């Protein structure tokens, strides 16, 4: 079961490309929600209010099912699609790449635009730190206090992250572990007996 995905760290990657006096400023952000994306886009639209185009593409979620490309009035598929192509070819998710274009007075044609947006996005990605993350699963286990030693041995061997724990006559522990090891952790906890 695949439980890994790649994304970029929270440091913003910046890129630049220039062609026939048109300037393309690119910014790659780690994002985790639509709201965050809207906020970042709003900041860029305000900051670069005098730019001709603010184009972008994003991919969200470990399954990469939530994605969007936007050409912002550039000819269809000449901006958002090449930006998105860079995200896909680097196998990334939870990422937004924004490319801002200052028009230089000379039309670049569709081929020229595709190259410009792709190159600017690639330059931004080259200034990012790419990291591997795991899809985690939460497991809550309730047990009598007398089983504490057994539960803690399993926790020590499998090394899940402890999210919360309550110890009383009846104890509850919530753990987080990468998806591929979740079943094994559940089985080990469920097979514990009173010690």
Image: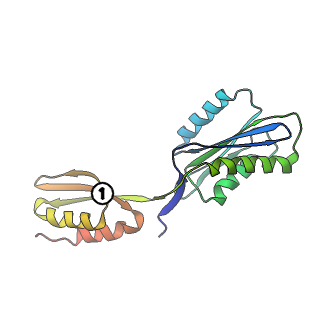
| Image coords of residue 139 (percent x, y) | 31, 59
Q: Residue at the location (63% across, 50% down)? A: 125
| Image coords of residue 170 (percent x, y) | 14, 56
Q: Is residue 52 left or right of residue 165?
A: right
Using the rendered image of the protein, determine whether residue 127 is visible from the camera's viewpoint: yes
Label 1: which secondary element: strand
| Image coords of residue 109 (percent x, y) | 88, 46
Q: How many marks?
A: 1
Q: Residue 64's image quarter?
A: bottom right
Q: Is residue 137 left or right of residue 3?
A: left
Using the rendered image of the protein, determine whether residue 78 is visible from the camera's viewpoint: no
What colour scheme does the image use? rainbow
Q: Residues within 10 Å of mark 1 (few under 14, many from 20)?
A: many
| Image coords of residue 136 (percent x, y) | 40, 58
**Is residue 156 positioned above or below 66 on the image?**
below
Q: Residue 195's image quarter?
A: bottom left
Q: Residue at the location (21% across, 55% down)? A: 172
Q: Is residue 103 left or right of residue 146?
A: right
Q: Residue at the location (64% across, 54% down)? A: 87
Of residues 114 and 25, the one nearer the viewer is 25
Identify the residue under disc 1.
Answer: 175
Q: Residue at the location (20% across, 63% down)? A: 152
Q: Is residue 160 left or right of residue 99?
A: left
Q: Residue 41's image quarter?
A: top right
């Amino acid at each position: 079961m695949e439980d890994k995905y790649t994304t970029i760290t929270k440091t913003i990657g910046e890129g630049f490309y220039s062609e026939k006096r048109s300037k393309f400023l690119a910014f790659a952000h780690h994002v985790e929600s639509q709201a965050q994306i809207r906020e970042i886009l709003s900041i860029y639209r305000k900051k670069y209010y005098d730019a001709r185009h603010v184009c972008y593409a994003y991919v969200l979620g470990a399954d990469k099912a939530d994605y969007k490309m936007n050409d912002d009035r550039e000819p269809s598929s000449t901006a958002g699609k090449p930006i998105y192509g860079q995200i896909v070819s680097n196998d990334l998710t939870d990422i937004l790449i924004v490319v801002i274009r200052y028009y230089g007075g000379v039309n670049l044609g569709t081929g020229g635009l595709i190259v410009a947006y792709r190159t600017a996005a690639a330059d931004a990605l080259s200034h990012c730190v790419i990291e591997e993350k795991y899809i985690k699963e939460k497991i809550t286990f309730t047990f009598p206090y007398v089983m504490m030693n057994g539960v803690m041995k399993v926790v020590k061997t499998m090394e899940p992250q402890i999210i919360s724990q309550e110890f009383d006559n009846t104890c509850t522990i919530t753990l987080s572990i990468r998806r591929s090891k979740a079943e094994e952790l559940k089985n080990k906890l469920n097979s514990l007996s009173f010690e």
